[in-house]
């Protein structure tokens, strides 16, 4: 028999999408990967796992806010434009936003419909 350190999967309450687009042009236009968004996504994922937060990090394409990236979008929530700031302080503020969003959504879960809502009305 195997003994493993089993951790049940955490069902995400929401996604945090990080733009990891890297421009393959020679115009030196700004892009999120060029400003450290891929490392940022890795770091977010590690911290979220370490804190066991019910959040999933998705790496995604350009969000058309390249000039003020790296860009992070909390699903149905805030758009965070880091504007080249990937410092430890800014990272902690992003984590603070994510924790706040978890608290807010955990406090207001989507309610299940009442039985009377799902049954057809009597003729
Ligand atoms: S490259 Fe990230 S928003 Fe365009």
Image (spheres, rainbow, N blue to C red):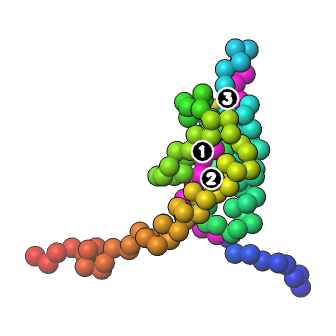
| 47 displayed left or right of 66 | right
> In the image, is residue 31 above or below residue 87?
above
Residue 24 magenta-highlighted: yes
Q: Residues within 10 Å of mark 3 (few under 14, many from 20)?
A: many
Q: Which residue is mark 3?
A: 31
Q: Which residue is mark 2?
A: 94
Task: Kindly state the secondary structure of the residue where label 2 is placed.
Answer: helix
Where does residue 62 sit, x and y in percent of width and height? 60, 33
Per the model, the C-alpha gap separating discs 3 and 1 is 13 Å
Q: Which residue is mark 1?
A: 72
Q: How many marks?
A: 3
* Quarter of the figure with the N terminus: bottom right
Residue at (28, 73) in percent of width and height:
118
Tell me whether the residue at label 2 lies in contact with that at label 1, contact meaning CB atoms closer than 8 angstroms.
yes
* Quarter of the figure with the C terminus: bottom left
In this view, the mark in front (2 or 3): 2
| 57 displayed left or right of 78 | right
Any atom of ligand 1 within 8 Å of the CB at mark 1? no
The answer to which of marks 2 and 3 sits earlier in the sequence is 3
Residue at (77, 44) in percent of width and height:
39
Any atom of ligand 1 within 8 Å of the CB at mark 3? yes
Residue 62 magenta-highlighted: no
Residue at (38, 74) in percent of width and height:
112
Ligand 1 location (quadrant): top right
Where does residue 117 sit, x and y in percent of width and height? 26, 74
In the picture, the disc for residue 115 is none
Magenta stretch, residue numbers: 10-25
């Amino acid at each position: 028999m195997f003994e493993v350190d089993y951790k049940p999967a955490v069902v995400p309450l929401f996604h945090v999408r990080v733009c990891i687009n890297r421009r393959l042009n020679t115009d030196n236009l700004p892009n999120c990967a060029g400003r450290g968004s891929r490392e940022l996504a890795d770091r977010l994922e590690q911290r979220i796992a370490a804190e066991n937060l019910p959040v999933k990090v998705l790496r995604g394409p350009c969000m058309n806010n390249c000039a003020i990236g790296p860009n992070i979008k909390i699903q149905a929530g805030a758009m965070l434009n880091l504007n080249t700031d990937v410092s430890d302080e800014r990272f902690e503020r992003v984590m603070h936003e994510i924790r706040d969003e978890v608290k807010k959504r955990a406090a207001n879960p989507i309610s299940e419909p009442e039985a009377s809502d799902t049954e057809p009305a009597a003729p």
